[in-house]
Image (cartoon, rainbow, N blue to C red):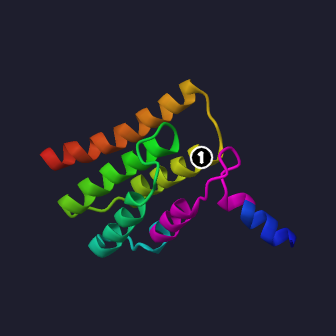
Amino acid sequence: MTNARAMKDVRTVDPQTGKSLKHLEAAEEEVASLDRAFDGAGLKALRTIVAGYPDMGAPGAGEVVASLFMLLEHLIADGRFDRDALLVHVRAWRLMATTTPDAEATAVLLSGLKSIRTLHNQARAA
């Protein structure tokens, strides 16, 4: 195995669980491909990728994925686009999928993601 191949394996397999990170990588690629304006088809494609994550809602990365899914639902329904909010969620997903933060750090991260969703809910209500 070449060094490049070994590095790819490190990035695509969760070191704690050995689970594939293919959904995360697909989500990262989809977010990177989105334009700066609302792209309903792109957001729906991202939602499909996220919905396919087998551990959505499970503690850790699954909680981040569930938050991302809820954000996507709001953005699609409202015809809005927030690249930064999507990027924060996808980066949080990678963090949770490749590290094991303690309970306090996890709670802070999830609270921050909830705050982002709350901002979009408030914009929806306005």
Q: Residue at (46%, 45%) from the top-left corner?
A: 62
Residue 18 shown in magenta: yes
Residue 14 shown in magenta: yes
Q: In the picture provided, is 120 more to the left or to the right than 66? A: left
* Residue at the extreme top: 104
Which quarter shows the N terminus?
A: bottom right
Residue 12 pos. (x, y %): 66, 61
- Three-letter code for the amino acid on which mark 1 is drawn: Leu
* Residue at the extreme right: 2
Q: Residue at (86%, 73%) from the top-left corner?
A: 2
**Total number of numbered discs in the rendering:** 1
Q: Can the viewer see residue 126 in this picture? A: no
Q: In the picture provided, is 73 more to the left or to the right than 57? A: left
Residue 122 vertical placement versus 21 (above, below): above
Residue marked by disc 1: 95
Quadrant of the rendered image containing residue 13: bottom right
Local crowd at mark 1 within 10 Å, few (<14), some, or many (≥20)?
A: some
Residue 4 pos. (x, y %): 81, 71
In this rendered view, identify the residue nearer to me: 9 or 30: 9
Residue 119 pos. (x, y %): 28, 43
Residue 62 vertical placement versus 104 (above, below): below
In this rendered view, identify the residue nearer to me: 76 or 6: 6
Q: In the picture provided, is 119 more to the left or to the right than 17? A: left
Element type at mark 1: helix
* Residue at the extreme left: 126
Residue 29 vertical placement versus 78 (above, below): below
Residue 61 vertical placement versus 104 (above, below): below
Q: Residue at (41%, 61%) from the top-left corner?
A: 52
Quadrant of the rendered image containing residue 31: bottom left
Q: Which residues are magenta?
A: 10-30
